[in-house]
Image (tube, helix red, strand yellow):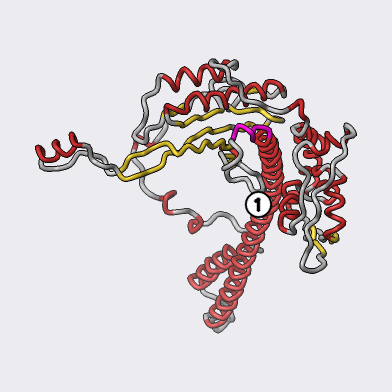
Amino acid sequence: MKPPSRTISRNELYARVWAEPLTKLAESFGISDVGLRKICQRHDIPLPPQGYRQRAQSGRVQNPTPLPRASEPETIELPASPVTSQFATDLMREVYGALIEAEDRPDQRITVSGAAEPKHPIARRISKALKACAPDKYGAVVYDGPEPFKVRVPPASVTRAVRLVDALALACDARALEIRTGDASRGQSGIIIAREAERLAIEEASRKQLHWSTEAEKARTRRLGYSTAPIYDFVPSGVMTVQISTAVYRDGVRSVWKDGKTKPVEDCLNDIMVGLFRSSHASAVDRLKGELRQRRADEENARRSALRAERAAARQQLETLEAQAAAWSRAQGLRAFIAARAAAHLNTQGELDAAAAAWIEQAQRHADRIDPLTPTPVSALDYDEADLRPISPWQIRDD
């Protein structure tokens, strides 16, 4: 049965959004904080900016963003979504809620270093590999090694990509998150958050444009009679993207951040950390739901298996019953015929001659053999054909 939904006025939801942490408010409503954000966006309810809660706790006076006027009074329905199951709520409260809220603190802000060399050993390994890599046909160098950071950028953007890796790896270390490489003996690679492995991909996509042949290419075409020049050139787009590759198909979890018109991806690193936490939470919920579905499926399959065995036994019993009833009915018919035959062959003294008596006796044995209610000794008719087939001497065992 679907759990009932509840309603709240737009003004009340606005007041509570600015008065309480979003994760705790969402928990009290029995929905995910991502779902609550979407509801606020749908009803044009402004949300507190990053760091608002910490500034309020420090005593700084802040004016909430005014609530835009609505065309008509609104009553908002808060649905009970599947993610509100008890274990999902408990996970958010006990593990992920504090991690997500901590990313709003000023002391947790992640910054990208402008140093010439990265500090983190993973970033140094990736930098070395990218600088030694030859560009592919799209003009990009690619790193897809054992670390949970995949990089695909044009050579001119290697330094920027490595700095992003360095900042994110250092942030993971500062938050005591294990970065597990693929060659580790403890399991799959990833940024380990509450036993869930998350991976990142940093990419600057190429932009396709028509290729204009050079004079050398034109001369080569005239000499060969055909063109060897490419149809398109691939040039850097200039837009850096960071993606949580493990969150691409997870509902309600943002997985992509990219350069905007006024905000580069370097200013989104705390949001990316929040995305990692949300992705880990979704992964844990999916895993637990999968285990629950598997357990229920196993229980249902066991029930069905028992029913199949019961049905097979009942069918076997019914087939045996029907076969025995048919045999009994056949035996009764034979006995009636035998009695009629015996009556027809009585002599004038009311007796059977020897031949008729022998026939009647043999016929009665046949009827008794068919009757399942009459025990009889083994008859020659009880043997299978395989038991009577001639055998060779080699089939006889030695004494």
Residue 229 in the magenta stretch? The answer is no
Residue 11 position, x and y percent, is 85, 58
For image coordinates 51% across by 74% down, the residue present is 353
Residue 210 position, x and y percent, is 31, 45
Which quarter of the figure has residue 230? Answer: top left
Which quarter of the rendering shows the C terminus? top left
Look at the image and give the residue range highlighted in magenta: 265-270
Describe the element under mark 1 as helix, strand or loop: helix
318 relative to 391, above or below: below
**Residue denoted by label 1:** 305
Residue 19 position, x and y percent, is 87, 45
Q: Is the magenta stretch mostly helix, strand or loop?
A: helix
For image coordinates 37% across by 33% down, the residue present is 139
Q: What residue type is labelled 1?
A: Ser
Q: Is residue 240 left or right of residue 215?
A: right
Residue 268 in the magenta stretch? The answer is yes
The residue furthest right is: 59
* Front residue of this view, candidates 342 and 315: 315
* Front residue of this view, candidates 215 and 363: 215
For image coordinates 81% across by 60% down, the residue present is 5
Which quarter of the rendering shows the N terminus? bottom right
